[in-house]
Amino acid sequence: MTSHFARRLADIQPFHVMELLRRARELEAQGCDIIHMEVGEPDFSTPPPMVEAATRFLATGDVQYTAALGLPRLRDAIARFYHDHLKADVAPERIVVTPGASGALILALAATTDPGDEWLLPDPGYPSNRHIVRSFEGVARALPVDAATRYQPTPGQLGAAWSPRTRGIVVASPSNPTGTLLDASELVALRDAVRARAGTLIVDEIYQGLTYGVDASTVLQSVDDVFVVNSFSKYFGMTGWRLGWLVVPAGYEREIEKLAQHFFISASTPAQHAALAAFAPATIELLEARRAEFAVRRDTLLPALRELGFVVAAEPQGAFYIYADVSRLADDSAALAHRLIEEAGVAATPGLDFGDHESRRHLRIAYTTRAERLLEAAERIERLHLSR
């Protein structure tokens, strides 16, 4: 058979952190001890109430498709969570349960993107966003952001970058890779700037709940004419279950349902039954204890990195990442990441995964492992005597 590859594939880059993880696994197979600070996956297991709920459901043997929009009980539970914990009123009809947050973003972009439409994406930002835009024949335009604005876009930047072809902007709060937040007034200002241009705002809230020193929040407390992407992976600890959700603006429900029917049929039924236990008081109590542990890890790693010469100009208030400037220590963060894994057994992600803007100066370091292991990683790095 003659191979034919769609032209869009030439623009789809590999996820470099996964390449790094593969090397880490190779070294571990050789007996090396690797401290994993590269992948955005907490080291906590799925909370027992969720596992028990899935086990009870599986024991019935009645594992069939759900409705394309998700289990009605789960959509109701998510709506109650917004009301009770986040002080936002969201109708269950606007909530779509998806195969991970990626499935939610795919639906939002598929419903709004025509060929040639431009989406503004903060750089640095989550890499898959630009590739999903490209997959729907849209154009991803980088919006360079830096520590001066906590790596978040402003209405002024948005206005300067907006063109007749711009469809909208995707923002994240908390952000990957920087862990920074947009507060309510900033989100409203961005929404107003987008709405004035008849555009679309998509807000990535998949790290919602993982905030430190500030309460968890949602853009839906203030506005409702936006798409909101969320996930059970991060705060709720269900990475491998592949479950997320999308909140859609009123009027999009039926069109999104049609897309979900064809793209996914439905999200995993066992995962949805597990998620029914996500909002139980016992589960929330456990998740809040884990959030406190993440705060300890952040407060352990930040000063240790700074003592080594890493510069963290915008401290993370959410997620579980530190975005560090390593230009005092190396000319290229990718080369440094490979040296760290090969010579120190420390895995971290180079900035090139997250865009082009000053990417060679930065590493993303995840504090998803125990505090004592984080300190051990710092000690290993110190022994390398890094300097330019």
Image (cartoon, rainbow, N blue to C red):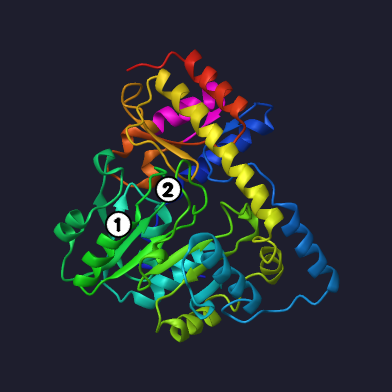
Circle 1 is placed at which residue position? 185
Q: Residue at x 69, y 51 (%)?
A: 46
Circle 2 is placed at which residue position? 176
Image depth: mark 2 or mark 1 in front: 1
Expressed as whole percent of the image width and height from the top left, the position of residue 188 reads 29, 62
Q: Residue at x 44, y 84 (%)?
A: 255
Q: CA distance from mark 2 to mark 1?
A: 21 Å
Q: Amino acid at mark 2?
A: Asn
Q: Residue at x 22, y 75 (%)?
A: 198
Position of the C terminus by quadrant: top left
The residues colored magenta run 334-348
Expressed as whole percent of the image width and height from the top left, the position of residue 6 reads 39, 68
- Residue 81 is tagged as none
Task: Evaluate whether residue 300 shows in this view.
Answer: yes
Verify whether residue 73 appears in magenta.
no
Taking 253 as reference, is 218 above or below it? Answer: above
Looking at the magenta stretch, what is its main secondary structure?
helix
Taking 183 as reference, is 59 above or below it? Answer: below
Determine the image quadrant of residue 275: bottom right
Query: Residue 266 vs residue 343: left or right?
Result: right
